[in-house]
Amino acid sequence: MPINNLKFVSSLLMLTVSACQSNDSKAAIAQEATTVKSWAATAQMLGEAWVQGSVPQVYAKQVLQKTTQELDKEAKTIQKEFADQPQLPQQVQQVQQAVQQMSQAIEQQNPAAIAQPLHQLAATQQQLDRLSQSAAPEGQP
């Protein structure tokens, strides 16, 4: 095989590997965004149920504590692996803040204080959904 053909094949192989890594990175970002969105939805549904009196305070506190723990794990992973993606860490932080506000409101038995964090969670879920869709590799939803 002539040297020019070797260079061409080598370049083609490098581009292919680079494209695969790019798709893997996009898929990972989409997965992280989906995971955070899921925890945000969990907190939102719980908050709405608590305001309606469908969920006892003890259960609500336990679920939000677990949500906080999982969001902390996600935040660490995202900070480590996707520091170059500023949108995702910001959105995780917004969800964490809303969950913290909800936890305080539930601890104080103050249903009126849940409205603003619920609104924030809904808005952040939409942002995460857009990020997840834009980061998904071609051919995936």
Image (cartoon, grey):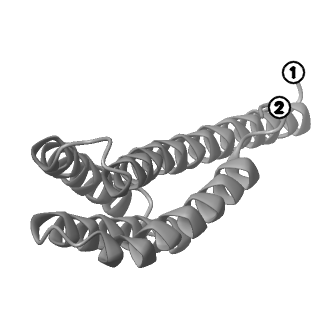
**In the image: residue 68, left or right of residue 82:** left
Residue drawn at point x = 61 percent, y = 39 percent: 27
Residue hosting label 1? 1
Q: Which amino acid, by three-letter code, is at mark 2?
A: Val
Residue drawn at point x = 54 percent, y = 44 percent: 34
**In the image: residue 56, left or right of residue 94:** left
Q: Which amino acid, by three-letter code, is at mark 1?
A: Met
Image quadrant occupied by the N terminus: top right
Q: Mark number for residue 61? A: none
Question: Which of the two discs, 1 and 2, sits closer to the camera?
Answer: 2
Residue 84 visible? The answer is: no
Image quadrant occupied by the C terminus: top right
Gap in angstroms between the C-alphas marked 1 and 2: 10 Å
The crowd level at tag 2 (other Cα within 10 Å; few <14, some 14-19, many 20+) is: few
* Frontmost residue, 3 versus 130: 130
Residue 114: x %, y % from top left: 35, 71
Residue 50: x %, y % from top left: 31, 51
Marks 1 and 2, the one that precedes in the sequence: 1
* Frontmost residue, 111 versus 12: 111
Residue drawn at point x = 39 percent, y = 55 percent: 81
Instruction: State yes or no: discs 1 and 2 in contact (Cβ < 8 Å).
Output: yes
SS for callout 2:
helix
Residue hosting label 2? 9
**In the image: residue 107, left or right of residue 117:** left
Residue drawn at point x = 26 percent, y = 74 percent: 101
Residue 80 visible? The answer is: yes
